[in-house]
Amino acid sequence: MEATTLIESFRVDGKVAVVTGAGSGIGRASALALAGAGAAVVCADINEETAAATAEQIVAAGGTGEGVALDVSVRGDVDALAERVLAERGGIHVWCNIAGIMVEGPFLEAREDDLDRILSVNLKGVFFGCQAAGRVMVTQAEGGSIINASSAAADAPSPNIVSYAICKAGVVQMTKSLAIEVGKKGVRVNAVAPGFVLTGMTGRYFVRPDGTVDEEMQEAVIGPMRKFTPLRKIGEPEDIAAAVLYLASDAARFMTGQVIRPNGGVAMV
């Protein structure tokens, strides 16, 4: 393959992409990356306002974007979105299951309702997205690409996030299982497993209720994480979005059932 053709293979012109959790963080960065590379992006988030803001940013940059409200834990709503996108846009070529929440606390004190809540979003929500997208993609001549958000927590245990880690480990196995079933139909299923990334989820440690940053607390949180990482740096949402774009594009046409780990080296598998 010639160099120019290889570079072009990272583009996703003419493809329709759905990104959950697109209202902020990694979801927003992924939606912007896909749109910047030519995709028409449906930006889905439980927060309709932030989903719309991401879509507006895409449109302002000359791309095609649409913001929609979506609770990924409601199977019927996920199915309905897939059906609507198919009917209105003629197909779904990329589906990114990025939406997620965090529940923290000691294992021995974990509450059942908290466990149920995180499982409904981080595991079942990905399951529903995979099903909805997969049903469409297996009928398309061009197949498609499903990208799931896992985490370094699935590889490197950390205290107080057992429920989160369970979900992310389950996402890895779900990704591999689905990849085997739909590969013959030209559908690729992969996952990204980020390390510590500066997002709203991690910012909860040092962002005050009014949105301002407690810089002393920020350094107290980020400093040790930076030292623990072989690259001595903290990830940005765009670092993960680059991996998402690769998996969405034809550059990854020979990739399925895999987990890409943009984590600065904190987990090497």
Image (cartoon, grey):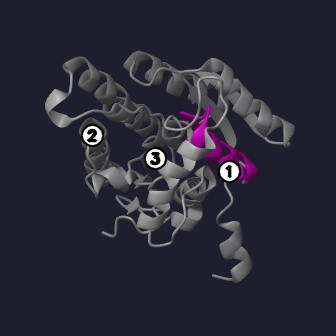
- Relative vertical location of residue 152 with respect to residue 111 in this rendering, above or below: below
Instruction: Say if mark 3 contacts mark 1, CB within 8 Å.
Output: no
Magenta residues, start to end? 13-36
- Residue at x-position 41% and y-position 16%: 76
Given this view, does label 1 or label 2 mark the residue nearer the observer? 2
Where in the figure is residue 217, as x and y percent of width and height?
Answer: 54, 43
Q: Quick one: SS at disc 2?
A: loop
**Amino acid residing under circle 3:** Ile
Along the horizontal axis of the image, is 120 left or right of 28? Answer: left
Where in the figure is residue 124, as x and y percent of width and height?
Answer: 32, 30
Given this view, does label 3 or label 2 mark the residue nearer the observer? 2
Q: Quick one: SS at disc 3?
A: strand
Q: Which callout, 3 or 2, points at the residue further toward the start of the chain?
A: 3
Q: Which residue is mark 1?
A: 33
Q: Which callout, 3 or 1, points at the residue further toward the start of the chain?
A: 1
* Residue at the bottom extreme of this rendering: 2
Along the horizontal axis of the image, is 202 left or right of 34? Answer: left
- Residue at x-position 39% and y-position 22%: 73
Q: Quick one: SS at disc 1?
A: helix
- Relative vertical location of residue 182 with respect to residue 98 in this rendering, above or below: below
Q: Is residue 179 something one can see in this rendering?
A: yes
Q: Which callout, 1 or 2, points at the residue further toward the start of the chain?
A: 1
For residue 146, the mark is 3
**Amino acid residing under circle 2:** Asn
Q: Which residue is mark 2?
A: 160
- Seen from the viewer's position, the closer of residues 265 and 90 is 265
Compute the Cα span from label 3 to label 2. Answer: 30 Å
For residue 147, the mark is none
